[in-house]
Amino acid sequence: MQTLHSLYNILVDIILIVIPLFLIVAYVTYSERKIIGFMQARLGPSRVGPYGLLQPIADVIKLLSKEIIIPSGANKNIFITAPIIMLVPSLLVWSVIPLSETFVLANINAGILFILAFTSLSVYGVILAGWSSNSKYAFLGSMRSAAQIIAYEIAMGFALVGVLMAAGSLNLQEIILSQSGGFFHWYWLPLFPLFIIYFIAGVAETNRAPFDVSEGESELVAGFHVEYSGITFALFFLAEYMNLILISILASIMFFGGWLSPFQGTWLEIFFDWVPGFIWLSLKTLIFIFIFLWLRATLPRYRYDQIMRLGWKVFLPITLIWIFFEGIMIYYNIEPWFSYVK
Amino acid sequence: MKEYQNFTMNFGPQHPAAHGVLRLILQMEGEVIKNADPHIGLLHRATEKLAESKPYNQTIGYMDRLDYVSMMCNEHAYVLAIEKALEIDIPLRAKYIRVLFDEITRILNHLLWLGAHALDIGAMSVFLYAFREREDLMDCYEAVSGTRMHATYYRPGGVIRDLPSQMPKYEKSSLKDNNEIKNSNYNREGSLLDFIDSFIERFPECVDEYENLLTDNRIWKQRTVGIGVVEPDRAVELGFTGPMLRGSGVNWDLRKMNPYEVYDDLKFDIPIGTKGDCYDRYLVRIEEMRQSIKLIKQCVNWLRENSGPVMIDDAKYAPPDREKMKSEMESLIHHFKIFSEGYCIPKSEVYASVEAPKGEFGVFLISDGANKPYRLKIRAPGFPHLASLNEMSKGHMLSDVVAIIGTQDIVFGEIDR
C-alpha cells in the first residue's frame, strides 16, 4: 500500500513537471519568434489567435498531421529511434532539477553527475540521426555536432566542477542552499569566468546561434535533421528547446542561487518574503532564455574549426586555471571562496 | 591498402545559400574544399536570342530581368549602346535622372547583397534591416515608372517621363488606422525629390547601424578576413570588375575611367581595398553606398534647380505627347510607328558599358540596319566572378564557400541570361 501510494505521488509529480514543460517549450518558441521579430523590425506571428498566441498550438497540429518521410536509403529502425534517443535524456534530466525549496522529483546526491551523464547521451541521437538518414548534409551536420558537443561538454563539465568545489556537494539543493545570503553571495561572483564559460558552452551544447554549425542553415540546410519531417522532426525540436530551458535553469541554479530570493540579507527581504521560490527561479531562467534569443538575433555564425579552437584552446585552459586557482583559495581558506565551504 | 575517395557533395540548386539556382559540385576532403565546380544554365531565358526578334525598344524590359536586383543599370547599358549606334545625344536633365537612378539602384543592390551576405554568414537581423531601407528605394522606382522592380524607365533618347511632382501616399485600410497612415506618409507630402532627400538624410545612420552589427564583430571578421583572397594581378586576369576588382586594390571604376552621362561633373570617391579578401570587399561596398548617397545628393540638388526636357525632341525615337497624338495626324503616325515597327539603326557595331553595382555591365550590339539587332551580346559582371569560384574557394572550408558566394554578389538572372 505504501509503495503504491508513493508511486502515485511520483506519477503526479511527473505530470506536474512534464505537462507544464511542454507548454513552456511551446511558448518559448512563440516568444522566440515574437522577440526576434521585434528585434528585426517585424511583427512575428500575429494571425492565429489574439497576438498570434495560438501559433504554437497550430504548429503542433501541423507537425502531428504531417507525413513522416523515411528516405529510401535510410536505416528505418535507427532513423525512427534517433529522435527518441534525443528526447529521452533531455526529459530525464528534469527529474533532479529543484524547482523550489521542497519540489524536486528525485533529490539525489549525485545531481550534477546525473545531469552531465544524461545531457551527454543526446549526442548519440545526433550521430544516429545523421548517420541513418543516408544524406550527406545530415552526415556532415552530425559529425560537426558530435565534435562540438564533446568539446563543449568538457568545458561545461569543468565549469560545473568549480561549482561543486565551492559548494562541497553534488546535490543540487545543497548547491543552492550554500549560495544563500543574497545577490553577492551567489556563485557568479567568485566563479565569474566559469559562469561565462558555462553559459557560452551551454549555447554551443544546445547547437544554438552563434554555434549552430551543425544545423547551419546557409551551409547544411538543416544539418543532422534535414531528412526528418512531421512528428520525428518535432521531437528534435522539442529536445532542442528543452535543452535550451535546461541550460538556462541550470545557469540560474549553479550561479544565481536557484530559487533563492535576490533580496536576501537586505532590507527588501521582508517585502518579497511572500514570493515563492519557484517564481524567482522562473524569472532568472527567463532572463537566460532571453539572452539565448538575443544572441541568435545579433551574431553571425562561427565556422566549424573556429568553434573547435575556441572550445579546446580558450575555454578549457581558462576553466583549468580557474579551478586550480579556486583550489588554492579553498585550501588556504581565503575569502570569499572559502566562506562558502561548510 | 584501402583507397580513400573525396566526399562529393551536391550544393544546390535548391539550397538556402545558392542565391537562386547555383549548383555546385563540391569535392571535399572532410570539410575542406578540393574542387568546386559551378554549374550554370538553370535560369537561362535566351534574352540575347529574344532580342534578335524584337524592335529595339521592346528589349528594354528584358534588360530589367537580367540582373534583377540592379534593374535600371542594365537598362542603362542597353540604351547607351543604342544611343551610341544612333549617335544621338540626350537632354542634360535626362542624364542627371539616369545618374540619380543608377545610384539608387546601386544602393538597392548593395543592400540586398549586404543582407544576403550577412544571412549566409548567420547574422539574420541585417537582412531585415536592409530590406526595410530597400522598401523606400523601391517606392522611388514605383513613383517614376509604376513598377517596383522591372521599371523599363530608361529609353533611347532619355527617360520615359519626368520625375513626379507628388509621391503616392498610403491610403486607409482595415489594417492601418489614421494615425499609422499619417506616420507612414510623413515623408510623402512633397515631390519625389523631397522623398529622396528624406531618405538620404536618414540612410547614413542606417549604414552605421549595419556596420555596428558587423564591421568590428569578431565573428564576422573571423569569417571574412583572409577568405577568398584574390591578388590584384590575378583579379585583372580573371576579368573581375566592380567591387570585386576594387576590393583587390585595383583602382578601376568606369564612372571615373570612362565617364558616361554626367559622372565627370560630379564629386565622388572610389574606395579600394588592400588585401582582396571578403572583408575588404565588404568594406568597399559599404563605402560605395555612402558615396552613392553623395552622388544622389548632388543630382537631387541639380534636378531641383534645373528643369527641361527629359527626352530628345525627335519624333523617330520619342513617343509623341498624348494629347497631340489624339488630335494630330503626324503624331498618331509617329506613335504607331514607334510602338509597332520601332526605328532602324544604321549598320554598325557598338559596345557600351556602365559601372553596374556588380561590375562592368556591357552590351555589344551589331546592327545590320534593321529595326532589331542582328546580334546582342551581354557582358554580365557576375559571370567571370562565378567562374573564379573554384580558384577562390580551393583549400577553404564548406562554410567559407558560402561566404565567397555571398561576397561575389551573384545573381543568376545575369549569369544565365
Image (cartoon, coloured by chain):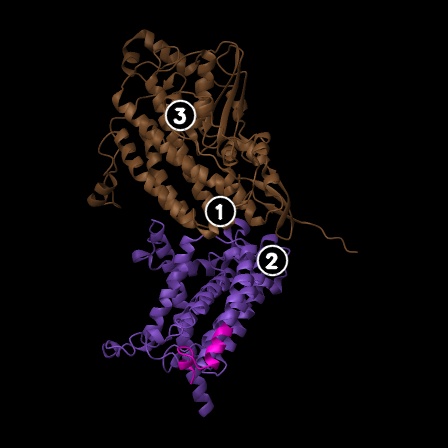
| Residue A24 image position (x, y, % from top left) | 38, 67
The type of residue carrying mark 3 is Thr
The type of residue carrying mark 2 is Ser
| Residue A148 image position (x, y, % from top left) | 55, 61
Q: Residue, x 36% and y 60% (percent of image)?
A: A31
Q: Nearer the viewer, residue B175 or B163?
A: B163
The label number, if any, that marks residue B152 in the structure image: 3
Crowding at mark 2 (Cα within 10 Å: few <14, some 14-19, many 20+): many
- Decide: marks 2, 1 in contact (CB < 8 A)? no
- Give the chain of mark 2: A
Q: CA distance from mark 2 to mark 1?
A: 25 Å
**Residue B265 vertical placement versus B409 (above, below):** above
Which residue corresponds to mark 1?
B120
Colour of chain A in the image: purple
Which residue corresponds to mark 2?
A133
Q: CA distance from mark 2 to mark 3?
A: 48 Å
- Decide: marks 1, 3 in contact (CB < 8 A)? no
Whether labels 2 and 1 belong to a single chain: the reply is: no
- Give the chain of mark 1: B
| Residue A82 image position (x, y, % from top left) | 57, 65
Instruction: From the rendered image, report the letter of the chain displayed in brown.
Output: B
Q: Is residue B343 left or right of residue A270?
A: right
Q: What span is in magenta?
A: A323-342
The type of residue carrying mark 1 is Asp
